[in-house]
Amino acid sequence: MKFVDEATILVSAGNGGNGCISFRREKFIPLGGPDGGDGGDGGSVWLQADENLNTLVDFRHQRHFRAQRGQNGMGRQMFGKAGEDVVIRVPVGTEVINVATDEIIGDLTRHGERLLVARGGTGGKGNVHFKSSVNRAPRKATPGTPGEEREIRLELKLLADVGLLGFPNAGKSTFIRAVSAATPKVADYPFTTLYPNLGVVSVETDRSFVVADIPGLIEGAAEGAGLGALFLRHIQRTRLLLHLVDMAPFGEGEDPVRQVRAIEEELRKHDPALLEKPRWLVLNKADLLPEQERQARAEAIIAALDWRQPWFMVSALGREGTWPVALKVQQFFDEQKAAAREAAEDAAARAEMGRDG
């Protein structure tokens, strides 16, 4: 299952510089003639696909991108300097749409691929171009043409990096609100989440990941019970699972250990390989327990589960402990990316050695 991340931005190319009207005036050269130079071309706006980006979250902070104007022409046939282009980095897989016409301008599918989205204006001609046998002192130059400006919509079809698992009311929607800008519906009854909610967690510029709030699973989900059956397939495409569990449940039969085991059984029924995927335990709703009891309760749950992977204790409602979880997740993906890059470099080096040998 794919989700769509969107951003709308305004791109303005630079105007061309104006041509210059000038005459050569030097001692002992009475008939110097016209020497006005051309204006420089305006800078263009390009999009460039970058495999190191995976969301459009950074466009929330900057929505207008403007390239530099071309410099005006000068005397002595000196041309104006061209304006500098603006290159906007976007994730691989970004589709670009003209908002005014709803036309698809292009689709960036490969790392390093570029797409021109606003062309710079052309520099004007200086009066040196207009002299003739009948007009030896032309007082004519042309202005630069305007650069293109358009509003474009960027659409990125995403697969979530992180999937949130857990029973209804485990606090998944509250957790995603705490760590991202997503605003899923939250209420104190089961099945509040009817569709997956997508949140982009931005740790800092160029470091972000996508988290999906999967509708609450219940026992029998693998056979079609509840709302989670459809989304078990989506979990297979995430790179990390965060398993949320209410560490302070009320009511008979709401033991956290039993709930974790029940979800594990549904994963096993759907696809045993899901249990091999990295899965971290997030003990939520710590604020409902007295402060002096929280750590002991958490350790008892971890011991009963014989949990060997990372685990955290948080209060998603109070946003206590949620940001350290986000930082740890980002570190996990950074390390994965570094390992993949190192493996690719090693493979390239071995291939090079093979050719030399």
Image (cartoon, rainbow, N blue to C red):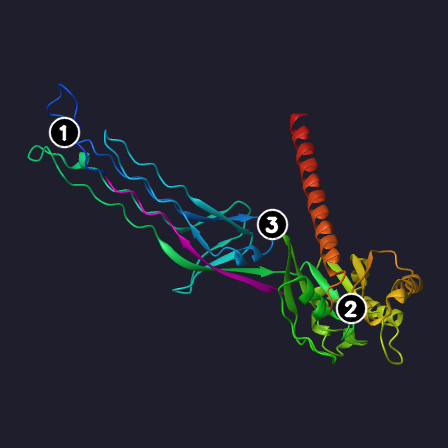
Q: Which is more toward the observer, 287 or 144? A: 287
Asked whether residue 108 is in view, the answer is yes
> Which amino acid type corresponds to the residue marked 2 in the rendered image?
His
SS category of the residue bearing label 3: loop
For residue 183, what is the image quadrant? bottom right
Q: Which is more toward the observer, 213 or 250? A: 250
Which residue was labeled with disc 2? 270
Which residue was labeled with disc 3? 206
Mark sitting earlier along the chain (3/1): 1
Asked if the residues shown at circle 3 and circle 2 are in contact, with their CB atoms under 8 angstroms apart, the answer is: no
Mark 3 vs mark 2: in front: 3
Residue range highlighted in magenta:
1-19
> Which amino acid type corresponds to the residue marked 3 in the rendered image?
Asp
> Which amino acid type corresponds to the residue marked 1 in the rendered image?
Gly
Q: Is residue 2 magenta?
A: yes
x and y, in percent, of residue 12 in the image: 39, 52
Mark 1 Cα-neighbour bin, 10 Å: few <14, some 14–19, many ≥20: some
Residue ID at (75%, 56%): 324
Residue 64 in the figure: left or right of residue 136: right
x and y, in percent, of residue 83 in the image: 37, 41
Which residue was labeled with disc 1? 33
